[in-house]
Image (tube, grey):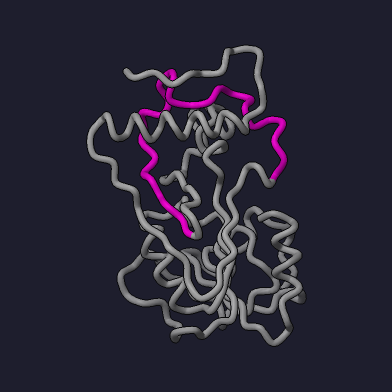
Amino acid sequence: MLDSAAQRIAELPDTARVLDVGGWAAPMARADAVIDLFPYETRGLYGPPVDPAAERFTAATWTQRDICASGPWPYADDEFDFVVCSHTLEDVRDPVRVCEELVRVARAGYVEVPAPVHELTYGVHGPWVGWSHHHWISELDGDGLRFTFKPHLLVEPGRHLPAGSCAGLAPEDLVLELWWEGSFAFGEQVLVGAEEFDGWLGGLLARAGERATPVASPRRARWRRP
């Protein structure tokens, strides 16, 4: 999560009830409750060393469950004043389902996902495009989010940005931020046929390339229809 976002959330009123959705790897100490697939005892894989004294949530307020399951989360409507979902939606099988619950259980919130430029650059995490475990490419769509399935064909020439394209970008250029109150729009983009997909990806690569770091070698990949 961006430091600026974490600071803003930390400054919420002490009386505000906060839920961290998918926070297992680096749970927010400010959260009063956490919901995640993995158990409380294994939290903090990517975050700083666990400091129970700084955590508002406890083992009792940590809910272990599949956040994409069809049933509602074990919280009432508007139970929380604020919900945080940072770098989780791109990982799960059904981000639309998760968003349905985000707007049901909280009055406001913050969502952070990788920007397309990060998800379409070769080599950011290994010899492939973007992050190996991410299933979706996220885009801001007005005041909401649109998710497009991340296909395996992105590794082909012309379907991604070259290695190093993200190297000089600031942290805020590598993510998308959505602060919302009341609700926000969300949905999956379903592309039918090669022409529709090619048109979307070509435009996305062009826009992402405008933000990318210039690289001398190899040459920046250009969109081409296979």
| Residue at image coords 70%, 69% | 9
User: In this orientation, which residue lies closer to the viewer: 110 or 94?
Assistant: 110
**Screen quadrant of the C terminus:** top left
Choose top left, top right, bottom left or bottom right for residue 224. top left
| Magenta span | 144-171
- Compare residues 121 and 222 and report the one nearer the observer: 222
Q: Is residue 187 magenta?
A: no
Report the number of discs.
Answer: 0
The image quarter containing residue 181 is: bottom right
In the rendered structure, does residue 154 fall within the stretch colored magenta?
yes
Instruction: Name the one closer to the observer, 180 or 9.
Output: 180
Question: Residue at position x 50%, y 33% from top?
Answer: 120
Q: Residue furthest left?
A: 193
User: Outermost residue, front direction?
Assistant: 142
Q: Which residue is drawn at 66% across and 22% down?
A: 214
Q: Position of residue 32 (x, y in %)?
A: 63, 79
Picture coordinates of residue 193 (x, y %)? 23, 34
Looking at the picture, does residue 134 appear above or below residue 179? above
Q: Which residue is at 53% across, 27% downward?
A: 122
Q: Position of residue 165 (x, y in %)?
A: 62, 27
Image quadrant occupied by the N terminus: bottom right
x and y percent of residue 77 in the render?
44, 84
Q: Using residue 143 as the reference point, say whether residue 9 is left or right of it.
A: right
